[in-house]
Image: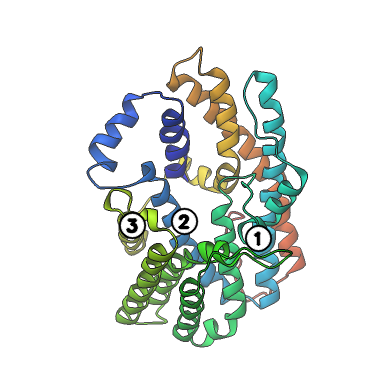
Amino acid sequence: MLLVLWDHIVGGWTTRNGRSWIGLNAVRDWVSGPFAIIQDFGFLGVTLFFLLSGYIISEVAVRESRRVFAVRRLLRIYPALIVSIVLIVLLDRLRPSFGLPNQGFGVAQTAWSMSLLNYVRVADSPVNGVAWSLIIEVLFYGMIFSCLGLLKRRPLVAIAVEMSIVLLVVATARNFPLTGLVPNWFQLSASVSYLPLLIIGQSIWMWRSHRASALQACVCTFCAWLIFVLGMRRIHTEFLAPSNSYGVSVFIAIAIFIVALTNESRIKLPKGIAALSVVSYSVYLIHGPLTSLVMDRLAPSLPFTVHATIALLILAILAALMWRFVEVPTQLLARRLTPVRAHHREPASLSAP
């Protein structure tokens, strides 16, 4: 999440507004530039999220029934998303009062964005710009839900089925928008094409949980990587060029993820990072429009470091409130609706997916 904040608040805002900051210049010159990491670490952060999600959701799913899995995952994703969209619409309406342009989101656009179906049906600009990653998450939940029995008994077969579904969708991607409630196949394919990153996380989970050998996990990872590359070649062609390559960020993310997992017992998480991780979903959902409003308003009179710091402090406060009054109650509701047997261990923290 911090990598995404760096991309959007530091890299993205300064680029859009023609500003320069010595810290960003140093990182670009000495880190992201030499290592060919695109989007100021933004996609690297998202890839780490997908790998982590594929790993953790698989571990959680095999301990749950389909009903428990569906209720808990949907209540984890949607309530905070819907609240974030309401907040973003309100912030957008405030912008003209500060002399700033706004987008003027319509009712239909807002409703489709709350459902995430805008990513598989219509081409409207989303209300929440980071929600593109959430439809990928929901599609992954759908695959897990469908293959849950196989995942529990024969995880290798389950992953093979998942990769076959993704391959079929990516290989048949066509840009022929349809009317009504029928999905636009090309837009659906664009989201599905990212699922191999979560399947790589699943493959690593199989190895770490002793459900597959290292060789089998490597084969699954390689096959998922090939499907991801096919998706880039057929759908996301702009990310094939070496100077704009998704591939480098994916490779680095996989390396970081594996090294972190194999050294997990040696890693001591700082209290500040642990606290930040609890509210990371709320931060992720609201950071863009909120910090943009604050920084756009303060930019003419304050240096970048000052107004960025103010924006981050306001973000931290609102994200903590959103976590306390939206995420915590809905996760508790999910657990009340889906009680588990005493011998099943619950995740230790309410921040668990």
Residue depicted at x 62% and y 45%: 128
Q: What element carries label 2?
A: helix
Label 3 belongs to which residue?
Answer: 240
Q: In this view, does 67 lie above or below 19?
A: below
User: Would residue 353 be seen by someone viewing this image from the given angle?
Assistant: no
Label 2 belongs to which residue?
Answer: 49
Q: State which tag comes first along the sequence, 3 or 2.
A: 2
User: How crowded is the residue under tag 1: few (<14 C-alpha within 10 Å), some, or many (20+)?
Assistant: many
**Mark closer to the observer (2, 1):** 1
Q: State which tag comes first along the sequence, 2 or 1.
A: 2
The quarter in which the C terminus is drawn is bottom right
Q: Is residue 278 above or below residue 24?
A: below
Q: Is mark 1 on a helix, strand or loop?
A: loop
Q: State which tag comes first along the sequence, 1 or 3.
A: 1
**Mark closer to the observer (3, 2):** 3
Q: Is residue 323 left or right of residue 214?
A: right
**Residue 266: where, in percent of width, then height?**
33, 56
Tag 2: amino acid: Phe
Tag 1: amino acid: Arg
Tag 3: amino acid: Leu
Q: Is residue 323 left or right of residue 231?
A: right
**Residue 47: where, in percent of width, then height?**
42, 56
Q: Is mark 3 on a helix, strand or loop?
A: loop
In depth, the one of 160 and 179 nearer the eye is 179
* Picture quadrant of residue 197: bottom left
Residue depicted at x 57% and y 42%: 283
Q: In this view, does 329 lie above or below 95?
A: below
Q: Is residue 288 left or right of residue 41?
A: right
Q: Is residue 133 above or below residue 192?
A: above
Label 1 belongs to which residue?
Answer: 121
